[in-house]
Amino acid sequence: MTKIPCVIFAGGKSSRMGEDKALLPFSNFSTLSEFQLQRLEKIFLNVYISCKDSKKFPFNANFILDANDSSTYAPTAGFVASFKYLKEDSFFAISVDSPFISKEVIQKIIDADTVELDATIARTDKGMQPLCGIYHRTLASAFIQMQDNNTHKLGQLLKTSNTQYLNFEDSNIFLNLNEPQDYQKALRLVNTPSL
């Protein structure tokens, strides 16, 4: 079990899905968010869910609310709230809709991270995966500035920061459930015995 806290980002708008993807049934769980929480609690000592409304979840968890910014559905508000809530100098950020990021991938990122960095982020041939990696408190003020300026591009922040990228060959691990067909694909994959 790793001591660095993990924050599951579940405050998105889910506009392409057409319904709140954090609440979609997944595997043997009533919601995708509970599926993520249960599997990540086997890796991290402390797991939190970043969201706008904890009442929508039909289970108990440690929630970090970004309720002060109810109009913004980008992860920026979640990062600001997480740095404010957590005492640690860094945390592992993961999206609620990426259920196949393995313990091995997570451990590789944790092992590669150092205190001198602002972030350690996964990358594939399809690009960087900003919601799979470690963010350090050195970026907290930058996130506040981004929120104040209504700019929410994580990639731009990472490019202008002291970011280490770790390359992974299998981009399927980072499948995001953005649209209904992605969800259907994930449902087929999660029921595959090899996973």
Image: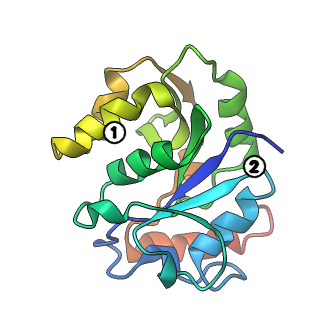
Q: Quadrant of the C terminus?
A: bottom right
In the image, which disc is placed on residue 154?
A: 1
In the image, which disc is placed on residue 44?
A: 2
Q: Residue furthest left?
A: 149
Q: Nearer the viewer, residue 137 or 95?
A: 137
Query: Is residue 151 visible in this depiction of the protein?
Result: no
Residue 193, given in percent of the width and then of the height, sits at 80, 69
User: Three-letter amino acid code at disc 1?
Assistant: Leu
Residue 32, given in percent of the width and then of the height, sits at 58, 74
Residue 6 versus residue 88 in the image, above or below: below
Q: In the displayed structure, does residue 137 sit left or right of residue 144?
A: right
Q: In the displayed structure, does residue 26 sit left or right of residue 55?
A: right
User: Three-letter amino acid code at disc 2?
Assistant: Phe
Q: Secondary structure at mark 2?
A: loop
Mark toward the start of the polypeptide (2 vs 1):
2
Q: Nearer the viewer, residue 11 or 80?
A: 80
CA neighbours of label 1 inside 10 A, class few (<14), some (14 to 19), many (20+)? some
Residue 107 versus residue 176 in the image, above or below: above
Residue 51, given in percent of the width and then of the height, sits at 45, 66
Q: Nearer the viewer, residue 174 or 8?
A: 8
Foreground mark, 2 or 1, reads 2
Quadrant position of residue 3: top right
Residue 48 versus residue 21 in the image, above or below: above
Look at the image and name its color scheme. Answer: rainbow
Q: Nearer the viewer, residue 71 or 87?
A: 87
Query: Is residue 146 visible in this depiction of the protein?
Result: yes
Residue plotted at (70% across, 50% down): 102
Residue plotted at (34% across, 31% down): 141
Q: Are marks 2 and 1 in contact (CB under 8 Å)?
A: no
Quadrant position of residue 8: bottom right
Q: Quadrant of the N terminus?
A: top right
CA neighbours of label 2 inside 10 A, class few (<14), some (14 to 19), many (20+)? some
